[in-house]
Amino acid sequence: MHKPIKTFFLLLLVMVALGAIALLFPKQGIRVGNNCTITFPSLSDIFLPDTSNTKDINQLFNAELLANIETNSDSLPTIDTLDSSMAAKLQDSSRVQQDSLLPTTPIRNIETKLPNIAIEHSDSAKAALRNFFESLLTIQPGTLPIRVLHYGDSQIEVDRISSRLRKRLQEQFGGGGYGFITLESAEQSYMMSVTSTNLWDTRKIKNKDDKEKKDFGPFFSSARIGITESGTKKEGYITISQNRLGRMVNRFSFCYRPTSPLLLQIKCDEATLYADIVSPSSKPLLTTVTIPASAKSISIKMQADQSPLIFGLGFDNSYGVAVDNIPIRGSSGLEFTRENFSVLSNSYQMLNARLILLEFGVNVVPTHARSYGYYEEALYRQLMYIRKAAPKASVMLIGVSDISKNENGRMVSHNNIEPIRDAQKRAAFRAGCAFWDCYKAMGGKNSMPAWVSAQPPLANKDYIHFTIKGANLIGDIFYKALMKDYQEFLASKNTLPDGQ
């Protein structure tokens, strides 16, 4: 018969042995090979855990503010969701919010309880954002949408942060729609139904097997279709369905590059809006059609000897602000120079790009180094390449967010986050770009655990990525900083609205 006293002494022996290991084990751990270190919690870690760096979300942000941040992705406005005074101002050709900002229009939707995390500049004149701010003053019917391209890593996937920025900018300056999306994103979108040619040859700029400069396009993903053959011609089709499409946007744009004479047809429901033979081109082309208010679907049919390169599908309004979400999973922001310069330059001009945002860093964190000068230099080259390709646009770098690792049972910030952030800032300043500190906006060192434990959570349990609610919060903090600089710009032109 098993005696409980034996079990007790066995457990006691195990505890004494573990205690001895905890007492004698080196605090810095034992290094095994180049990439592995074995650690063991000390007695103080077990019995006197360090809580000095623990942060509470209610210490970082106002509780009322957190309660008012939506937990779902921002939806697109329709005529039905606008207030009656706004709806009365809308013309039939602008079915979503289109009241462009005038210098006398107050800045709306700035939550005063949001923290003030200023955009940083290398000069007191803050010249890096002047091109973007000047373009906002030109918004009026008959002008092209002012386009914001938001590049980033997996932190901005599923339209995170971009959707919030889009919502705020369009509330203030007019505009509507999703912006441009790639074919792959369209097929995965919950906002629309897409049917198309069954097989795709999709190439992304992050693919390691594509080392040379190629036509990835401005959205860093290109697709070839035309698997189904009709005689000697290759055919491809895409159909996008959304019951409220015509009430959300009034423009559809197709971004592509024909490599042989292309028979292109664009239909809205059953009506043909565009049909022509497009000549081969060495640069991207943009075909844009006006969508009627009753529109529920858009279909594109192509026929050519060689499949065209398809870069993106654009859903916008005829003027205002458009924001494109361009995630590049696994990227550190160093792929821009892999795109053919003339393709990138022509694309930015064609799209009327006026603000280019880069939000990267989380994929640099796992690579621990003594210095991040190499990253600063590589990032600087990317920023200069973009500035040269888009001389009429403002360029801004959004810094790395906080990321946690498990250290002796506690989730703490990686010790290289601040050096990476500093390298990003130096690269931005050297290139004449603006910089915004996302890490600081979160609350700084060891803030991520507070975001994860918030109710509802602001970040996922991978301690890397924001939830939709967290992304909305970051988007609002960033928008507040952007509008603060815009107000200073207006003041410098003596056009600051009354009461601002």
Image: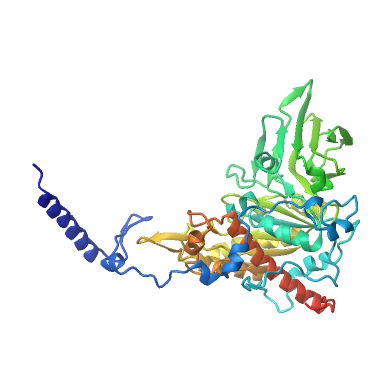
Residue 399 pos. (x, y %)? 59, 64
> On screen, 74 above or below 425?
above
Q: Residue furthest toward the top?
A: 231
Residue 186 pos. (x, y %)? 69, 41
Viewer-side residue, 453 vs 100: 453
Residue 442 pos. (x, y %)? 56, 66
**Residue at position x 74%, y 50% in the image:** 178
Residue 489 pos. (x, y %)? 78, 74
Viewer-side residue, 41 vs 102: 102
Quadrant in the picture for the N terminus? top left
Quadrant in the picture for the C terminus? bottom right
- Is any atom of residue 93 visible in this view? yes
Q: Residue furthest toward the front?
A: 84
Judging from the image, the colouring scheme is: rainbow
**Residue at position x 68%, y 58% in the image:** 164
> On screen, 144 above or below 245?
below
> On screen, 428 above or below 298?
below
Viewer-side residue, 200 vs 405: 405
**120 sits to left or right of 246:** left
* Count of numbered circles on the image: 0
Viewer-side residue, 494 vs 57: 57
